Every structure is written in structure tokens, then in C-alpha cells.
């Protein structure tokens, strides 16, 4: 009897270490395994339920993929002075994926080395109108996110930053008024 139990335990350990459970979960690790070929990552599902696979982005030296908005906020709070590129300074226009040019009442850009997997580009940022990219310690103070009207843009959030987390009542009103006009964004959230 002892021999049978020993063989069974060895079999069970080997099975758990190598086999996949239901729904693509590795039984030994408990993590969901990718249904995409090696070198690709899953980024949602097609309408028929099959996984949407895409090539993993190539990172340049010094770039880092940060998976979620919450992870980004924590990271920037701990390391606040990352390189910022303003592709749309205050007064320029941005379409936000539409056919309408919206004049920006704030500086809009990205952290060039902090990559958002939603679009494989730098995480987007908005600098409160009372500040500039040259201010030190630009820390997240809020965000605005796409809603279900633009499902392909969900995850491509815009992080609102201010020097030392200090912003004015006017900053808040200007940003909220701007995004209230764009129905495909959720209301601005402040920390």
C-alpha cells in the first residue's frame, strides 16, 4: 500500500508541475497562462471569444512597462522627476480620436520612458494649468479615463499631475469643464 501511495504522490506532483488546468490556469503556480504564442501577449478578446494576441512591445533602453494606472501612480509618487515630452502644449489642439480639434487649456504629453500597454506608448499626462513641465516633483493628483463609448481606448488613461500635489480650484474647474464636454470620458477623478 505504501508503494502505491508513494507512486501516486510522485505522479500527482509531476502532473501539477507540468499540466494546465481548466481555463488555461497552471495548476502548480495558480497563474493564468497565456493563450497566445510565445513572443506575443494577450490584449483582450475578439467578439467571438478568442484571445486577441499582439507582439510584445520592444522596449528602448531605460523604458519600463507599467501595467496599470494604480501602479503608475505609486511609481511616479516614489520617483517623481521622470522625463516628460509635451506633444500638445497649452493652446494647441487635440482630437482624442475624433474629427474635432479641441483647444487644450493645459499642457498635454507623456512620460516617454513609462510605457502604457494599452497603446504601447508613454503614459499620457495632463499638467494642471497653473504649472509647467519645468516644475519639480510633478505628482499625480487625479485622472480621466475613457468610458464604453470608446471601448478600444479603455486603459489609455490621462494622469493629472501637479507640483508637490498642489493645484488650485481654477485648475480643477478648467480640467473638469474641458472633459465634461467630451462624452466618451468618465468624469475626472481627483485623489
Image (cartoon, helix red, strand yellow):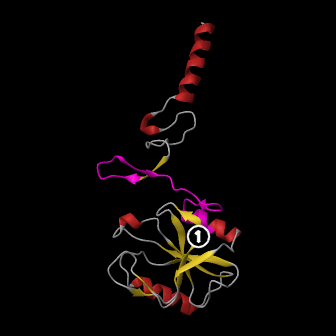
Residue at position x 29%, y 48% in the image: 48
Q: Secondary structure at mark 1?
A: strand
Residue 22 lies in quadrant: top left
The local crowd at label 1, few if under 14, some if 14 to 19, many if 20 or more residues have their Cα within 10 Å, is: some
How many numbered discs? Answer: 1
Q: Quadrant of the C terminus?
A: bottom right
What residue is disc 1 on?
112
Q: Quadrant of the N terminus?
A: top right
Residue at position x 55%, y 59% in the image: 67
Give the answer, above or below, for where 43 lies relative to 152: above
Give the answer, above or below, for where 43 lies relative to 191: above
Question: Which of 180 and 35 lies nearest the eye of the viewer?
Answer: 35
Magenta span of residues: 44-73
Can residue 6 be found in the magenta stretch?
A: no
Q: Position of residue 139 (x, y in %)?
A: 65, 76
Q: Is residue 179 left or right of residue 80?
A: left
Residue 103 lies in quadrant: bottom left
Residue at position x 40%, y 77% in the image: 96
Q: Position of residue 137 (x, y in %)?
A: 70, 79
Q: Position of residue 136 (x, y in %)?
A: 70, 82
Give the answer, above or below, for where 120 lies relative to 38: below
Can residue 68 be found in the magenta stretch?
A: yes
Q: Is residue 65 left or right of residue 102?
A: right
Question: Which of 116 and 143 lies nearest the eye of the viewer?
Answer: 116
Amino acid at each position: 500500500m505504501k508503494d502505491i501511495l508513494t507512486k501516486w504522490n510522485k505522479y500527482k506532483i509531476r502532473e501539477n508541475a507540468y499540466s494546465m488546468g481548466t481555463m488555461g490556469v497552471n495548476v502548480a503556480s495558480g497563474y493564468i497562462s497565456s493563450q497566445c504564442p510565445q513572443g506575443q501577449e494577450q490584449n483582450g478578446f475578439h467578439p467571438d471569444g478568442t484571445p486577441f494576441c499582439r507582439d510584445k512591445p520592444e522596449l528602448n533602453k531605460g523604458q519600463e512597462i507599467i501595467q496599470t494606472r494604480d501602479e503608475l501612480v505609486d511609481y511616479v509618487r516614489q520617483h517623481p522627476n521622470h522625463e516628460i515630452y509635451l506633444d500638445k502644449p497649452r493652446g494647441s489642439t487635440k482630437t482624442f480620436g475624433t474629427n474635432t480639434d479641441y483647444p487644450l487649456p493645459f499642457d498635454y504629453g507623456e512620460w516617454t520612458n513609462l510605457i502604457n500597454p494599452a497603446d504601447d506608448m508613454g503614459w499620457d499626462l495632463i499638467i494642471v494649468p497653473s504649472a509647467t513641465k519645468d516644475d519639480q516633483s510633478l505628482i499625480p493628483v487625479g485622472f480621466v479615463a475613457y468610458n464604453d463609448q470608446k471601448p478600444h481606448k479603455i486603459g489609455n488613461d490621462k494622469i493629472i499631475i501637479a507640483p508637490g500635489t498642489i493645484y488650485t480650484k481654477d485648475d480643477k474647474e478648467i480640467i473638469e469643464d474641458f472633459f465634461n464636454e467630451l462624452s466618451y470620458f468618465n468624469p475626472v477623478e481627483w485623489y
